[in-house]
Every structure is written in C-alpha cells, then in structure tokens.
Image: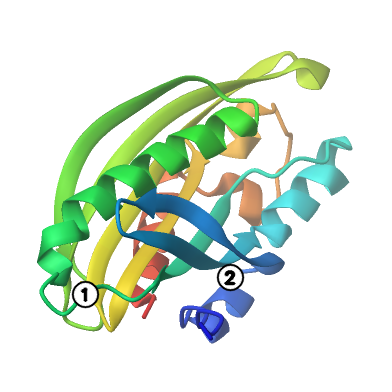
Amino acid sequence: MPTDPAFPDVPAAQLRDGGWELVDESVETVFQLPTARVEGATKVYDAAETREAVRDAIGLDHQWRFFFATALSFTPPLAPGIGPAMILPTVRSEAQSAFANELADRGFKSVERGRRERVRVDSGDRARLRTYSAELDLEPVDATLSITGWVGVWHGDGFRIAAGAYPDRSLATLLNVENPPEPLRRSPSDYRAELLTLIRAVA
C-alpha cells in the first residue's frame, strides 16, 4: 500500500516571527507522468500580519502575499532506471504551469512568465527559480494590484516546490493609507528578500 507523502519541512519560527499563518494543508494529485501519478503534500501560508494591517487601516480584507511549499511523491515509485535528473525538467514545467493556473484561479489577469534564476537552497541543493507577473483589479478601492511571483523547483531529499507572490508596490502607496503601520510601509524589495529566504529554507 502506498503511504501518504510527507509534508515538506518549512522554517516554522521564521514564518511565525514574520506574521505568517498556515491556512491550508492538503495532499492531492498534482499531475500525471506516463508511468506514475505525482502527489503533492502542500502547506499554504498567508501573510496574516499584512492582511490584518490593511483591514484595520481601510477595512479591506484581502490576501496580499502568500507562500507555499510542496513535497512530491510518486505512485508507483519511480523505476530504478529513472533518476531524478531525467524527470526534473517535467516536474519543473508542470510546477510552473500549476503556479500560473493558481494565479488565474485567484482572479489575476495578464499572468506572464518572466526570467529564470539559479540559487543554492539551504540544504545545499541547486534550485531553479522562475518569476511571474500578474494583475488584479481591486474594485472596492479602485486600484490595481500588480504582483511578482517566484516558483522554485529542486531535488534533494525528494522533489520540492516552493513558491509565493507579493505586491510590486508598498501597500501604503497602493491603497493611499495615511500614517501607515510598519507592515504597510514595506517595499517590494523587502517582500522579495523575505520570500526568497523562505523558499531557500524549505527542505
């Protein structure tokens, strides 16, 4: 009998200190290979501190930033002759497509794929990152939320996917918040640094 895939290790203390909240844990089939079903065990986090700061400031409840991490498993297990390097390009392509679809499901428009980067994650493995951009009309405040998303895929102790997205402007500026609290003054570069640190810490 196949066992349920294990969830990925995430930087719990860093997420807690950064005001992130676990909002979903799930195990589901994420895609099919010719010889196996690929299941993902995923943890999804919302930047609750940011969300609460906006809600308190202007009364708008929205998810402004998110982060998730997925560990993949294969049913049946990959045959001995099939090494991770052989299917990593397929896993990467499927993960990126799934991320773009996730943005569309969240209501974002003009979802576009951007540049690629390579980074070394905290486990020492090399990951490939891909950026995405997208826009969402915020009708209650007559503004457009533009975001940048990052998707990282690598193989270490199994296949890992880690990703997230953040606003391209400070929320104080985007939402015209006067005397904003600290969470709303953060810049896109602050968001980017935090997200990439979280991605690299997944194991």
Circle nearer the viewer, 1 or 2 = 1
Look at the image and tell me whether residue 148 can be seen. no
Q: Nearer the viewer, residue 111 or 177?
A: 111
Q: Position of residue 94 (x, y in %)?
A: 34, 45
Q: Is residue 45 left or right of residue 30?
A: right
Please give left or right for residue 25 compared with residue 199 in the image: right
Q: Is residue 6 above or below residue 168?
A: below
* Residue displayed at 55% across by 66% down: 42
**In the rendered picture of this protein, how many numbered marks are placed on residues?**
2
Crowd class of label 1 (few under 14; some 14 to 19; many from 20; radius 10 Å): few
Q: Is residue 175 visible?
A: yes
Measuring 42% from the left and 61% from the top, which residue is drawn there? 38
Q: Amino acid at mark 1?
A: Ala
Percent x, y of residue 64: 64, 43
Q: Is residue 91 above or below residue 144?
A: below
Name the mark on residue 79. Answer: 1
Q: Residue at x 76, y 44 (%)?
A: 54
Q: Quadrant of residue 60?
A: top right
Quarter of the image that includes the C terminus: bottom left
Which picture quadrant has residue 61?
Answer: top right
- The x, y position of residue 25, in whole percent, is 66, 69
Numbered label attached to residue 18: 2
Number of residues whose C-alpha sits closer than 10 Å to that of mark 2, classed few (under 14), some (14–19) or many (20 or more): some
Image coords of residue 47 (percent x, y) = 64, 58
Which sits in the foreground, 81 or 22? Answer: 81
Going from the N terminus, do you reach mark 1 or mark 2 first?
2
For this rendering, which residue is in front, 191 or 1? 1
For mark 2, give the secondary structure.
loop
**Residue 63, relative to residue 9: is it above or below?**
above
| Quarter assignment of residue 145 | top right
Q: Real-space Cα distance between discs 1 and 2? A: 41 Å
